[in-house]
Image (spheres, rainbow, N blue to C red):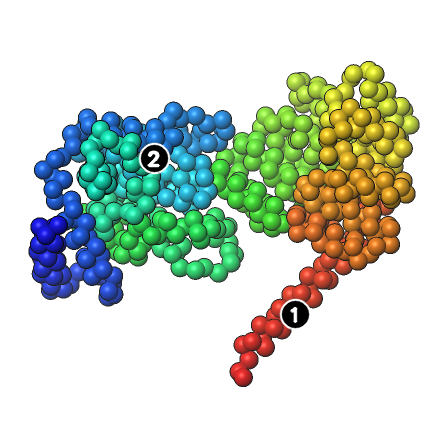
Amino acid sequence: MRAQRIVALILCVAGGIAVRMLERRGVPAEVSPRPLLYLVADTEEEAERIPLTLTRVSDSEEVKVGEQMAAGCGLTPVHFDDDEDRRIYQYVNLVGLRVAQGVQRKAIPYHFYYIPDDDFVNAEALPGGQIVIGRGLLRLLDTEDELASILGHEITHVDRRHSIGQVQIELQSRKLGLEDLYALGEPGLRLFEAGYTKEQELEADRGGLELAVAAGYSARGGVDAMKRLEELEQPSPPANSLEDEMAQVPAQALEEYFRSHPPAGERVTALQKEIADNGWDATKPQRPLEILDIFLAARAQELDQQGEFAKSIALYKKALAANPSSAPILFGLAQANWRSGDAAETVQAAKDALLAGNRGTGVWQLLADALATQDPRGAANALGLEMTHYPDGTTMDITVESLGLRLLGADADKALADCKQLADPSSNALSADNRERLAWWMYRTGKLQDAEAILEDVHQSFPMDDHVKAERAWILSDLGRQADALDLAKLAPQNQGEGEAVLALVEWRAAQHGDADSSFAEAAAADPVWLEPHWAAHNYSPQAAAILDQLRTVELARRQKEKEEAEKARREDAAPQ
């Protein structure tokens, strides 16, 4: 221990001399106590590192260590059920392996792992070429060049032996050898939470940028990525642009990254100097991030659920600009348009989703729902015309939608007879889901008794299906059976606020207006779509929609009053005493 203190003192003295020399050279640096704090911390850690040079781990040993750690962290074997996660993983590996071509230690094979967690706003380098990056960090990037620089940073930590040094320090502190690695107790990424020394981080920045440039990427990528992180270090106002929306990352998720890395501003300055010193072209065009559409669409879906429909639709369209033929994005756009009340745009987006290959039940249902609001009497023909474009589109799901739309047309009586025949449980023609959907078309077109009869049969077969309880509550309330509807409404699932909304409807009809207002407020808090003026009219019976519209007006007035009172209180608090 005494020897380490002596080494630390020597390093401090040397550091003081170095600082004096840097002052004379005029190297730009932030004027703050931070450099001194880093110097003290670094000298203590470097004093621990010095003996490690005498027992340097071989490349083959390091690879084994990395493989053990990757397995201990659950990184191997790699398996993704989700197509998008698989696509992201493959893309990260493609870019990472391209960047790793320029490493110094050629005996180290590199493997890149993707953590599909929005709260993992970080990247880590385990020994032996095991590189980890989280979804939370990936969604902040705009270009492949930025990704290349970040992966290059982590690769450099391995290439310059920073990562294996971390493990050696931990093992040495516990008096363990490499063969006792598992005695660390799932060491994994936790070994690296404290981060590296400031000099190691800056070295990794420089080395990562050099690797990225050598692989053909723009030097600007590293600077742009670091500037984005620099902006996130500071508290920011609410997002006003699409770019700002993509930077909406939970502050808590960013704390770990900022805690384990030097201030981004210093790193930007160092990178800019590195570019100038090497004469790299920072104006070289950057490559698009080929997985950007995934993150744009994910954020668009979040905004949709928050009731920010205009922003959601704008981000979906930006995602489509990056991947025009994406069926999932087109379906998401159709859903956002429908929830925003724009039936015409819903029709177009649903048609585009069909054309892109999404022939699922959800797309046909959205298309049918939107067509019913556009031209009720001609909706069945319009859907039939769409069906002719897809020879494979002959499923029972489409038959149900066609029958439902016929209830709006001139042959409503014949359509009702066909619906009842098809929905007859003795025929076994329809699944429970399709019978529910057919009953819902009957409800929306005023065939209440028939709809209730079908749902009662479904309930008898599947008494645990809570969604049927919600649907029956809507129907029974329209039939005037408020007591029965109330019992079912209380059992309805709290799914997108529907349970609270139908409860509000029943309470209003039972003259319990105060309770109805409270229940509707809960529905709107669960899903802002209930505040959208067209939502009830597009999805529920005219009688129910009229009451829900009144409840919506009351809730909007309450929110406005609450906002005004909060503003008044803010002004009073800010006024001079």
Q: How many badges with numbers are in the image?
A: 2
Task: Decide if residue 292 is on the left or right side of residue 366.
Answer: left
Residue pictured at 47% horizontal, 51% vertical:
250
Is residue 435 visible from the viewing direction of this image? no
Local packing at callout 1 (Cα closer than 10 Å; few below 14, some 14-19, many 20+) is: few
* Residue behind mark 1: 565
Q: Nearer the viewer, residue 200 or 52?
A: 52
Local packing at callout 2 (Cα closer than 10 Å; few below 14, some 14-19, many 20+) is: some
Residue pictured at 54% horizontal, 84% vertical:
577
- First-in-chain label (2 vs 1): 2
Cβ atoms under marks 2 and 1 closer than 8 Å: no
User: Which structural element holds mark 1?
Assistant: helix
Q: Nearer the viewer, residue 375 or 446?
A: 446
- Which residue type does callout 2 highlight? Glu
In this rendering, the answer to whether 57 lies above or below 280 is: above
* Residue behind mark 2: 186
